[in-house]
Image: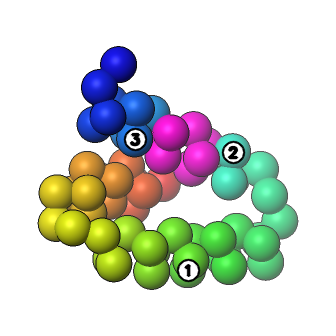
Amino acid sequence: MDLTNALQRLMALFVEHMSTLSADITSVLKSKVTEWIVSQAGFIQALLGSIYWES
């Protein structure tokens, strides 16, 4: 499995499981993950952002 595919799968799994948490925790996690994605290089933003912001 290449890095791109691994990162996409990891983010998809994270987003799927994040929906099972309480609203307060989910809000904090979404904020932190958004900050992290924005701080990454453009290709990582595009790769993960499309998965993350779909949820």
Which is more toward the observer, 42 or 14? 42
Q: Is residue 13 above or below residue 23?
A: above
Q: Mark 3 or mark 1, which is nearer to you?
A: 3
Percent coordinates x, y for residue 8 in the rendering = 38, 39
Crowding around mark 3 (Cα neighbors within 10 Å: few <14, some 14 to 19, many 20+) is some
Q: Which residue is mark 1?
A: 31
User: What range is drawn magenta here?
Assistant: 10-16
**Furthest-right residue in this view:** 22
Q: Is residue 27 above or below residue 49?
A: below
> Hey, what amino acid is under mark 3?
Leu
Residue sitting at 45 percent across and 80 percent down?
A: 35
Q: Which residue is mark 3?
A: 7
Q: Residue 40 lies in magenta, yes or no?
A: no
Question: Which corner quadrant of the image does residue 25 belong to?
Answer: bottom right
**Furthest-top residue in this view:** 1
Q: Which mark is residue 17?
A: 2
Tell me the CA gap for discs 3 and 2: 15 Å
